[in-house]
Amino acid sequence: MDIRPDPSPVPKSVLSLAQEKQAMLAAIVATSDDAIISKTLDGIITTWNHAAEYIFGYSEAEMVGRHISVIIPEERYAEEDYIMGQISKGKRIEHFETFRLRKDGKLIPLSVSVSPIINSNGRIIGASKIARDVSERQKSEEKDGILAAIIATSDDTIISKTLEGIITSWNPAAERMFGYTETEAIGQHISLIIPLERYKEETYIIGQIARGKKIEHFETVRQHKDGRAISISVSVSPVVDSKGNVIGASKIARDISARLAAEEENARLYQQIKTLNEKKDEFIGLASHELKTPLTSISGYLQILDRMITDNKAKHFLTKTRQQVGKLTALIGDLLDVSKIEAGKLQLATELFDIHQLTADTIEVIRLNNPAHEISLETATDGIMVTGDPNRIEQVIINLLTNGIRYSPKVKRIEVSISSTNHEVQVAVKDFGIGITTEQLAHIFSRFYRVDNLTPSISGLGIGLYLSHEIITRHNGRIWADSEPGNGSTFYFSLPL
Ligand code: ADP
């Protein structure tokens, strides 16, 4: 049989029935997408259609008359021998997958069917071969394989369903999450895993999906086979067919019970800490109040004693005792102030006063108690009137001066200066002591903050600067510091005029 297309078609009216059939076959061969090749039993190519030209890159003229081995990779010669052996026995070979060589040397995967060609005497005279290029199919099979592997090994649950809600796929993670096997789940309605009270949600989701919309990271609750509720975060996407029609939904779900539990635990811990903190503030307030009462009477009795005692030695001890009681009173006063601030009850008794005078008087008191220190005061003008609580401002100045003294173990000099502009007055207290690092400067005005390790020998509660900051802020002023470790610090505060 010669299945080469007839180069000069004869008018239909004059064609015999056999000729007509022949022409039709020729047309089929010529227009086929599959390569159709015929060859003799010796392997000489006798026909080569358009699709063969396209798949193998050789033209008909190049190939007719040549040996078929042109397109057979060397390592597959044996395969060809086997095929021809079968053909000479009159047997067909169907959909056999192999590789052939293109003209450019590239190997192409083919699915081949080979049939014997029998002449009118019933003798086998050759073979016809139909070959289909399966590279595209193989590529998409590979892609499907990769996708399937991803879905199978994913830690996230991946489920697909039709628009009617019938489950069409169910990965191993879905089995673990919901307790149903793939066989149990596929074909069932998705309501299998939806708690009754959430059915409405599913109607909404499907509505969105049908309109081609995605739903992302939506947090909800689903139900395990054993009835247990599972908190999940789910993203749902439409599944679209090749024509762009939405045919279902794919759903990726992640168990968020652990995250929700951790969030709940955090909220609980936060509440607990808050309560403890409030209790601590309450305790500080209560304790300092309770300590203050006996201390006040001790001070009173010591004062009476001071008037009664005449013995010098006894008077000396009494002075020491009164000094220590004074320190204790100041500490307790500070603690009381802290709890007042926390409770929002720090009162200011505002009046108009001379800040220069107040500073000078305060320095005088400090000098009396620290005779070894040299405290200077420098000011351009005296008589600077400000509105505020002079007792509280005095408290700030005392605090800055005593800090300057306490944190300067070597240099016994403190320089205080006052300067003013049209709208504010600024007081600076400069020492030449141990200094503060930039990192620590950021914290020194916080409650209970102390630079540990640096100052283990200097006792304190870490509340003086906190109180000073509160007092100055309540006066609409500012307080800050400059320092260089080893070279001393300057603390400033300013008050509006
Ligand atoms: P304390 O009672 O600890 O002195 P403060 O609130 O007055 O509390 O000060 C907080 C911390 O700031 C101190 O522990 C100290 O480390 C640091 N500090 C304060 N003033 C000075 C200063 N003049 N020089 C060096 N460090 C200082």
Image (tube, grey):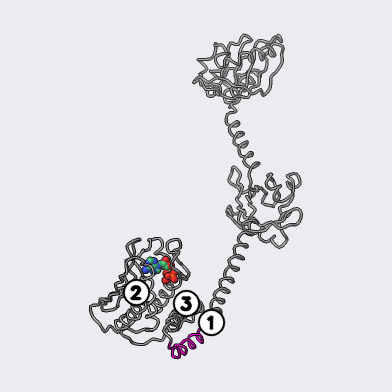
Label 3 CB-ligand 1 distance < 8 A: no
Residue 90 locus on image (x, y percent): 71, 13
| Quadrant in which the C terminus appears | bottom left
What secondary structure is found at the residue carrying circle 2?
strand
Q: Which mark is residue 289?
A: 1
Residue 468 locus on image (x, y percent): 41, 75
Say which label, 3 or 2, has the lower sequence index. 3
Residue 444 visible within the image = no
Say which label, 2 or 1, has the lower sequence index. 1
Of residues 94 and 140, the one drawn nearer to the viewer in this rendering: 140
Q: Which mark is residue 493?
A: 2
Dots 3, 1 in contact, CB < 8 A = no
Q: Is residue 88 magenta?
A: no
Label 2: few (<14), some or many (≥20) within 10 Å?
many
As drawn, is 251 to the left or to the right of 394? right
Give the residue type that dot 2 points to. Phe
> Would you name the residue on which mark 3 appears?
331
Q: Quadrant of residue 231?
A: bottom right
What secondary structure is found at the residue carrying circle 3?
helix
Label 2 CB-ligand 1 distance < 8 A: no
What secondary structure is found at the residue carrying circle 1?
helix
